[in-house]
Image: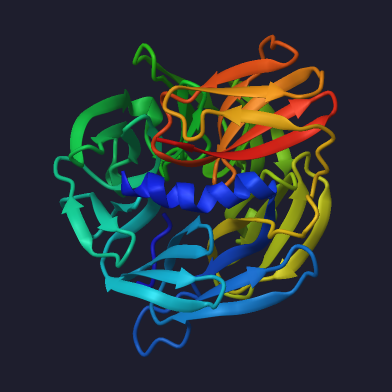
Amino acid sequence: MKKRFLHPFIFLCLGIIAPIILNGQTPYVKQIITANSGKFEYIPPFQDFVTLQSYNPVNGAVNLINTVFTQSSQDICLHGSIAYFAAQDSIIKINLNTNQRIAAVADSGLGKLFLFGNKLVVSKQYPITTFFAEVLDTADLSLVTSIAGIPGDCGNMVAAGDSIYLAVNGGWNGTEGKIAVIETSGWTLAREINLGAEAIGTFGVYRYNNLIFTINKSPYTTPDVGSITIYNLDNHTFRNTIINKNVGLGAGIDGHLLYFGLNYGIGSFNMNTMQVEDTVVIADPGSALFKYITSATVDTLNKRLYVNIGDYATTGTCLIYTLSGDSVTSYATGISSDAIAVDYRLAPVGIANLEQEPMSIKVYPNPVSDKLFLSLREKADIQSIQISDISGRILIRQNSEFNDKISSVSCRDLPRGMYYLIVETSGGKIVRPFVKQ
């Protein structure tokens, strides 16, 4: 069957970030990267293969990046101009400036990808029967270690401090949802958090402040019941929120809203109230006629939802919406567009900021180990402070009272790496990159 449904790093970042701070560069969306798996083919010779394509949100151009001669796509992970791509039997590293392959390795049972410093963490699934996570060196994709003790098929992951929290669903015959906590200092399984039978189908994982949210897909046996689990990093407690609807893939976070598959469309979950906010941000595209959402992602800079639609047999379409569900435009994709990611970049010197900053700000210390301070040189009301990773995912958000000129945000639990500080003020939005050491 073709596919299943289913430090040195600090110095590197400092070398990248120093000119960014001096020249006041601003992040922008260069392109949207989509991986198309192709149609179902059960026996060779196969005629359809995986393709990587790009979409330019400025001029609407769609271009082929690369063809991978295998049978399905699993995930895309981006870091600057570098793309890491997991296909059925291989992991590929591609330079998105030249569209050339830098490295490739054979592998099997691939699931999702996650970058942690200069390591690429890979979750595994069927037909793997042991070592359901492995760690690769980002330089050449060589194997660093395989992580023992994880009990079954895995999904997405997120970092908190020096630990990685990995969704464990056990595959099609899983009976409970679990989170495997991986200690990155030695790349070992530190502990396992059993979320119980209500969290069956654990797959998507997101972090919001001191909370971890898992999206638990509806199992085949009860397709109209799913759940979202909230795990508290401070007191190590969790609660399962049962949702009496079909729960599917995760799309991403913007502010306090988590966008996820709901009733075969896209809904939103309020991470402050811990309740479903909107049951129909985007409607079911036609599941009764075998047309499904195959992948989706949130563009947090332009406030857009990119949603791939397809029937797994013919070419599909990516529909672009505002985060409130208004249709913007669309473009053609391939067959079975099972992975999608936003390529965030920093505007080169001489290009005007996408959002004009009406005031200046000082951010210190940089790099930071604990508290990051920000000082406005002009008086303004700070409405919120957010920290996002380089892919645009909001990891921390503060909405409490702030001093007019000097405020701070704790970065203690962030893993080492590069981040963006996003400050919403009464005078506009300010974005500054920084490094956590």
- The answer to whether residue 273 is visible is no
Q: Where is residue 382 in the image (x, y as percent from the top left)?
A: 75, 19
Colour logic: rainbow
Name the residue at the front extreme: 22
Please give the name of the residue rendered at 32% of the width and 60% of the height, measured from the top-left corner.
110
Which quarter of the rendering shows the N terminus? bottom left
Q: Where is residue 7 in the image (x, y as percent from the top left)?
A: 31, 43
Instruction: Please tell me which residue lies in front, 421 or 155.
Output: 421
Residue 285 visible, this angle? yes
Viewer-proximal residue, 5 or 165?
Answer: 165
**Residue at (68%, 60%) from the top-left corner?**
348
The picture places residue 309, in percent across and down from the top left corner, at 65, 61
The residue located at (20%, 30%) in the rendering is: 190
Residue 277, x across and y down, in percent: 68, 26
Q: Is residue 268 left or right of residue 198?
A: right
Nearest the eye: 123 or 164: 164
Locate residue 299 relative to residue 116 in the image: left or right. right
Q: Which of the image's four quarters has the C terminus?
A: top left
* The image quarter in which residue 412 lies: top left
Pick whichever, 88 or 32, lies toward us: 32
Please tell me how many numbered marks the rendered image carries.
0
Q: Is residue 47 above or below residue 374?
A: below
Residue drawn at (39%, 26%) of the image: 198
- Rendering quarter of residue 192: top left
